Amino acid sequence: MAESSQSRGPFMKRIKRVLCPVDFSETSTKALEYAERVARSTGAELILLHVFDVPEDLGMLGQQVPSDATLPDKLQAIGPSSPDVPVERMLHAGPPAEVICWLAQDRHCDLIVMGTEGRTGLAHLFLGSVAEHVLRHARSPVVVVRNRPANEPPLEEPRVLPLRPPRFL
């Protein structure tokens, strides 16, 4: 018996559009590979977004035209390896986390796939985290991909200690 889309709830709807923010780093490349697999397996459109610093001469045109003239070519050079994945490339100025959340909402993205460096401690405190902001504020589900070292040891099974008996026994 086929399940109707209404009975699956809002989080089980078909993925039609995947947003993948890119910053041309190795971690971003891993996220793009994952986003491409999701888009290919669901038949979704893939939106590649690069957010750049606000240019000094900000005007309406300045939101899409970066002061670094090489960015459009860099963004054009990356993308899905499969021709069956429709892709749209976008450049936008502003604070990355806010632009990502807004654009995902504005373009009705069903999923955001992004990379993170996984900073902790003082680096996280001082630098903040774009991924954390997106996780907290995005209106659509977010998948965060980390670039883990190849020699990273596997996780160990958690140890569960036996409970102490109550004192009155």
Image (cartoon, rainbow, N blue to C red):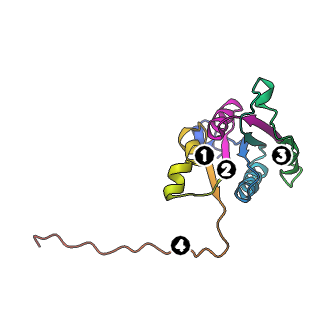
Q: CA distance from mark 4 to mark 2?
A: 23 Å
Can you tell which of label 4 and label 3 is closer to the viewer? 3
Instruction: Indicate left or right for 92 with 168 as reference.
Output: right
Which amino acid type is shown beneath numbered disc 3? Leu
Which amino acid type is shown beneath numbered disc 1? Val
Say which residue label 1 marks.
Answer: 130
Q: Earlier in the sequence, mark 4 or mark 3?
A: 3
Q: Earlier in the sequence, mark 4 or mark 1?
A: 1
Q: Secondary structure at mark 2?
A: strand
Q: CA distance from mark 2 to mark 3?
A: 15 Å
**Residue at (75%, 41%) from the top-left corner?**
49
Can you tell which of label 2 and label 3 is closer to the viewer? 3
Q: Secondary structure at mark 3?
A: helix
Residue sticking out furthest to the left: 168
Region rendered in magenta: 88-114
Does residue 64 sit above or below 34 in this rendering? above
Instruction: Indicate left or right for 148 with 159 as reference.
Output: right
Q: Secondary structure at mark 1?
A: helix
Say which residue label 4 marks.
Answer: 155
Q: Are marks 4 and 3 in contact (CB under 8 Å)?
A: no
Say which residue label 3 marks.
Answer: 75
**Residue at (53%, 42%) from the top-left corner?**
136
Q: Earlier in the sequence, mark 2 or mark 1?
A: 2
Q: Are marks 2 and 1 in contact (CB under 8 Å)?
A: yes
> How dense is the environment of label 2, judged by Cα within 10 Å: few (below 14), some, or many (20 and up)?
many
The numbered disc on residue 114 is 2
Determine which quarter of the picture holds residue 146.
Answer: bottom right
Q: Earlier in the sequence, mark 3 or mark 1?
A: 3
Query: In the depicted view, which residue is nearer to us: 107 or 56?
Result: 56
